[in-house]
Image (spheres, rainbow, N blue to C red):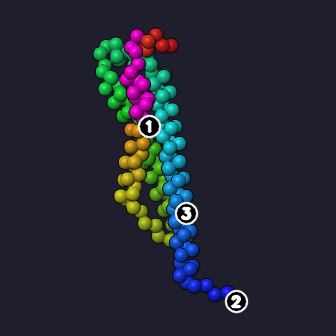
Amino acid sequence: YQAQDLMEQAKQIQQLSQSTNTMLIWIAAISLLVGGIGVMNIMLVTVTERTREIGLKKAIGARKKTIMMQFLTEAVVLTSLGGLLGVLTGLILAKMISLLNGTPVAISIPASIFSVLFSMLIGIVFGLIPSWKAANLDPIEALRHE
């Protein structure tokens, strides 16, 4: 037979829990970074595809700020919709798992709101470079772009 101290078991469980939480935080951080880079790449492609449009807007008097805000808004809308879709998917999956195993699931409205707001922040941060690039295009060169 083997005897174990309950305090030792509790300590091991706590260490395992901390390790799991740390791993999940790293996975989330890497996922957000990869997702943000993906959004930035999509927005850079959008800027490239719409170079003539941007040049035309600048030629008729659009300000840098206006063009920058347009592309930042597009990035924020894109990430916000992604955040909402992620939260809804998570809620649906949690509810389905709850129904399957009979365990109640607590849904945190503040955490859901924070998730969507954080996805908006990701859109702002990773939308800055493409929007800055769009705002600083030379209108003459942009109009020549094929």
Q: Residue 20 carries which label?
A: 3
Give the residue type at disc 2: Tyr
Q: Is residue 137 magenta?
A: yes
Is residue 145 visible in this depiction of the protein? yes
Q: Residue 1 carries which label?
A: 2
Tell me which numbered mark, 3 or 2, is placed earlier along the sequence. Answer: 2
Point out residue 139 in the picture as x, y percentages from the top left corner. 39, 14
Separation of residues labelled 3 and 2 (CA atoms): 30 Å
Q: Does the magenta stretch include residue 104?
A: no
Tell me which numbered mark, 1 or 3, is placed earlier along the sequence. Answer: 3
Q: Name the residue under label 1.
A: 126
Label 1 close to label 3 by CB (< 8 Å):
no
Is residue 81 visible in this depiction of the protein? no
> Which element carries disc 2, helix, strand or loop?
loop
How crowded pointer 1 is (Cα within 10 Å; few <14, some 14-19, many 20+) is rated as: many
Q: Residue at x 52, y 72 (%)?
A: 14
Q: Count every numbered label the image shows and give the total.
A: 3
Q: Which residue is drawn at 50% across and 27% down?
A: 45
Q: Residue at x 50, y 13 (%)?
A: 146
Give the magenta-colored segment's residue range: 127-140
Q: Could you say which quadrant of the image residue 140 lies in?
A: top left
67, above or below 19, in the image: above
